Image: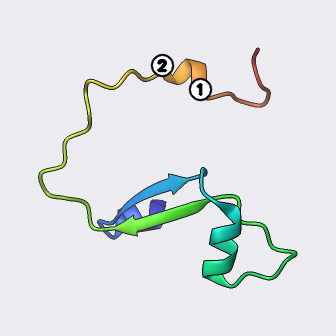
């Protein structure tokens, strides 16, 4: 993702998808299980992040060295 950004490409990390469909589409062998996908493309020039979304603060979603309950 960092390399893509250095090439002025945008990326999106996808971790929620139909595993069976992904395996079929990508023709993956049975022993390979996809856990994420990264979409890569050129971002829209007029892109503006959604400021109305309700996001958790980073302190509640990023953990260093151990998970906090």
- In the image, farthest residue toward the left: 46
Which residue corresponds to the image point at 63% horizontal and 81% vertical from the top-left?
A: 26
Position of residue 32 relative to residue 61, above or below, is: below
Which residue corresponds to the image point at 77% horizontal and 31% vertical from the top-left?
A: 65
Tell which of 57 and 21 is nearer to you: 21
Tell which of 7 and 61 is nearer to you: 61
Which residue corresponds to the image point at 48% horizontal and 20% vertical from the top-left?
A: 56
Which residue corresponds to the image point at 26% horizontal and 38% vertical from the top-left?
A: 49
- In the picture of the structure, the residue carrying the numbered disc 1 is 61
Instruction: Indicate the secondary structure of the residue bearing disc 1.
Output: helix
Measured from the top left, where is residue 60 in percent x and y? 58, 19
Instruction: Kindly identify which numbered label has been placed on residue 36.
Output: none
Q: Residues within 10 Å of mark 1 (few under 14, many from 20)?
A: few
- In the image, farthest residue toward the top: 69
Tell which of 5 and 61 is nearer to you: 61
Q: Tell me the quarter of the picture where residue 66 sits.
A: top right
Label 1 to label 2: alpha-carbon separation: 7 Å
- In the picture of the structure, the residue carrying the numbered disc 2 is 57
- Label count reads 2
Q: Residues within 10 Å of mark 2 (few under 14, many from 20)?
A: few
Measured from the top left, where is residue 69 in percent x and y? 76, 14
Q: Tell me the quarter of the picture where residue 28 sits.
A: bottom right
- In the image, farthest residue toward the right: 31
Colour theme:
rainbow
Instruction: Indicate the secondary structure of the residue bearing disc 2.
Output: loop
Measured from the top left, where is residue 6 in percent x and y? 36, 65
Tell which of 37 and 16 is nearer to you: 16
Is label 1 in contact with label 2 (beta carbons under 8 Å)?
yes
């Amino acid at each position: 993702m960092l390399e893509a950004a250095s090439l002025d490409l945008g990326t999106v990390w996808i971790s929620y998808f139909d595993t069976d469909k992904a395996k079929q589409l990508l023709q993956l062998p049975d022993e390979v299980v996809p856990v994420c996908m990264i979409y890569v493309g050129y971002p829209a020039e007029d892109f503006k992040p959604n400021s109305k979304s309700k996001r958790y603060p980073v302190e509640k979603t990023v953990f260093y060295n151990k998970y906090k309950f």
